Image (cartoon, grey):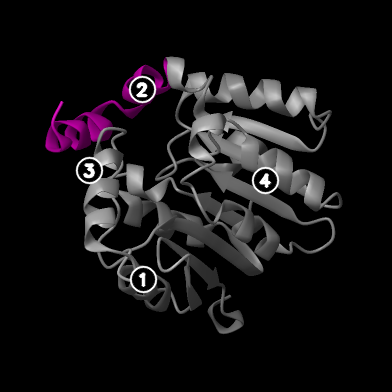
Amino acid sequence: MTQSEFASSQLSNPPHLMDHIYKHQRFIYDASRKYYLLGRDDLIAGLQPPSNGKVLELGCGTGRNLVLAAKTYPNATFFGLDISTQMLKTAGNSIYKADLKDRVHLAKGDATTFNSKTAFGVDGFDRIFISFSLSMIPRWRDVLEHAQDLLNARGQIHIVDFGSCNHLPKSFKTLLYRWLRAFHVTPIENMAEQVKEIAHKAGHDVEIKQLYKNYSLYCVITKNTLAE
């Protein structure tokens, strides 16, 4: 399948496609991804939700981040959304084994359109985080725009994804991007500028950090109190 065919399929029937991709990958996903999804733990350390806060992960996958975040912030309640039934099975098992089923809740849905009240019985969130998922979603801008609408007062969206690698050898970037395409991942061109554009259009503040010589990009959108 070509990249354009993948994008077209994801737009027309994403649940089927994602379940096909992760039917078997979900069993080795965490073991294989820990070597190159750099920045996930930086994001979790930066969440700092308020006491009794509500935290949502979009594209929660295996639940790895949710479990770690829930253990890090025991006074918050966590929610995870994913479009893949297969990944949600693994996430559910991980949450159960970690004895977090009372504090971490899962739902299946499309991150561009889901209704938080229907999915979780929640109107808004204090923190929303997205870890290496935007680069797999053709309509990733719609994800961010929808997420901004779900923020509570002074809420934040935390994003980590592949950067431009402009401080690393060009040969490394070429090989990395070629390898990522095999997993239907397309790093977002000029991601920092595009995230700033989306946040500023909504009247929100944004902070951008380069991690690991810009291998990863860490973005934080903060809801501006004047926009509430």
Residue 200 at least partly seen: yes
Residue 14 falls inside the magenta stretch: yes
Q: CB atoms at circles 2 and 1 under 8 Å apart?
A: no
Query: Helix, strand or loop at disc 4?
Result: loop
User: From what the image shows, is residue 60 above or below residue 165?
Assistant: above
Q: Which stretch is magenta?
A: 1-23
Q: Which residue is denoted by mark 3 in the rendering?
A: 178
The first of marks 4 and 2 along the sequence is: 2
Q: CB atoms at circles 4 and 2 under 8 Å apart?
A: no
Q: Which residue is denoted by mark 1 in the rendering?
A: 192
Q: Amino acid at mark 2?
A: Ile
The first of marks 2 and 1 along the sequence is: 2
Q: Which residue is denoted by mark 4 in the rendering?
A: 122
The residue depicted at 56 percent of the width and 79 percent of the height is 224
The residue depicted at 57 percent of the width and 73 percent of the height is 222
Q: Residues within 10 Å of mark 2 (few under 14, many from 20)?
A: some
